[in-house]
Image (spheres, rainbow, N blue to C red):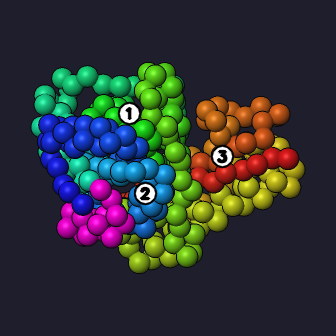
Amino acid sequence: MMTVCTAADLRARIREWRARQNRIALVPTMGNLHAGHLRLVQHARASADRVVVSIFVNPMQFGPGEDFARYPRTLEADRAALMEADADLLFLPDLEVMYPRDLDQMTRVEVPALGDILCGAARPGHFAGVSTVVAKLFNLVQPDSAVFGEKDYQQLVIIRRMVEDLNIPVSIEGITTVREPDGLAMSSRNRYLEPGERAIAPRLYQVLCEVRERLSAGERDHGAVEQAALEALTLAGFEPDYVSIRRAADLASPAAADQALRVLAAARLGAMRLIDNIEISIT
């Protein structure tokens, strides 16, 4: 596996692969890789000739008071894991490569409405930072496909909308959330949980499963189901931000005829804000 840090070196390698008619897949990450990230790399490896993984802790998607400075950076362990996963290239850009001007002077890519709801309401500007950095990576790598985890489901929907609206020729592939044995969705931030909080954290997934069970059993009062879930999380020790049942395709409020749904949740547990979601199919 080779490592490149500049746009020129990256593009030179991409040109070589394109000359050989190689299919290229991109896995964008912020590093501190865990089994969930490696599942994305494995999927990319199975579907493309060449796999590019980017590691860039993106300051544009962090708000004031968020954990940009202390976000875990584990480059050597990440590099070893990517070599084991048979990635072809690690793109490791410096801040100046991605943002040659001050952040407030940089061109931004925003997806209206979708970026302002759910986590976007709690973290203003977050999804503009995500869509901007992903658009830049797509321009730099020019992949045939890009692979994202469904744990950040709102992000996945936003990126799909961005690609559609801007006619970016990249296939967006979403991969099922990878979980710990007790159900907790894998996340780079889970290491921040105190032992007592870690014991409580799987309750978030359990509550989402309870929502799915109620809807699958025929309950259709979404507001009542969401409120019960919020109360269950509070009782468990969380400070819930939201529990919301949405249409899977576009995160709109579902109509009675909609069958493909998602229930999404965000809740604070101590200093940590956890997010999760699960698929619901109504028949």
- Is-magenta flag for residue 79? yes
- Is-magenta flag for residue 82? yes
Boundaries of the magenta span: 73-88
- The residue indicated by pointer 1 is 131
Q: Which mark is residue 113?
A: none
Q: Position of residue 72 (x, y in %)?
A: 26, 61
Please name the residue shown 65% across and 57% down the image: 208
Q: Which mark is residue 45?
A: 2
Q: Depth check: 93 or 87 in front?
A: 87
Instruction: Give the main secondary structure of the magenta stretch.
Output: helix
Q: What is the secondary structure assignment of the residue under circle 2?
A: helix
User: Neighbour class for label 3 at 10 Å: few (<14), some, many (≥20)?
Assistant: many
Quarter of image, res 107: top left
Please name the residue shown 44% across and 21% down the image: 166
Disc 1 residue type (three-letter): Ser
Q: Position of residue 222 (x, y in %)?
A: 75, 43
Above or below: residue 137 compared with residue 242: above
